[in-house]
Amino acid sequence: MTGGPTIRMEANGPYIVTGPITILDADGREHRVAEGHTVKLCRCGHSAKKPYCDETHRRVDFVSRPSFEPEPTER
Ligand code: FES
């Protein structure tokens, strides 16, 4: 694996983002994730601390796709 940023999909859980990467909110505020550090971003939509995961996905029994599906193409 490279030292660059990665996003890993946790089965039935969040996106795990490993830095270095900068996340910008809708107002342009930055959250910098240092190289090798991680943050978990909510994928279930139920976190009270969005965009971060607060483990609520476990309580709501979130079920995710286990892997990538082809992205729909538009014509
Ligand atoms: S993925 Fe963990 S609270 Fe949504």
Image (tube, rainbow, N blue to C red):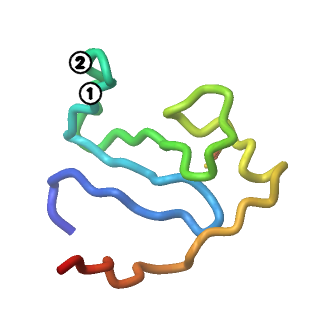
Could you tell me how far apart the alpha carbons at marks 2 and 1 are, in whole angstroms? 5 Å
Mark 2: C-beta under 8 Å from nearest atom of ligand 1: no
Question: Residue flagged by tag 2: what amino acid is it?
Answer: Gly
Residue 26 percent across, percent down from the top left: 32, 23
Tag of residue 24: 1
Residue 39 position in % (x across, y down): 44, 39
Q: Is residue 55 left or right of residue 5?
A: right
Q: Is residue 20 above or below residue 57?
A: above
In the rendering, which numbered label is found on residue 28?
2
**Residue 20 at x, y percent in the picture:** 20, 40
Element at label 2: loop
Return the residue found at the far front: 75
Q: Residue furthest bottom?
A: 70
Q: Residue at x 22, y 77 (%)?
A: 74
Marks 2/1 in contact by CB < 8 Å: the verdict is: yes
User: What amino acid is found at the position of numbered circle 1 in the picture?
Assistant: Leu
Residue at 24% over, 80% down: 73
**Residue at horizontal 40 percent and vertical 79 percent from the top:** 68
Quarter of the picture containing the N terminus is bottom left
Assess disc 2: are there few (<14), some (14-19) or many (≥20) residues with their C-alpha within 10 Å of its C-alpha. few
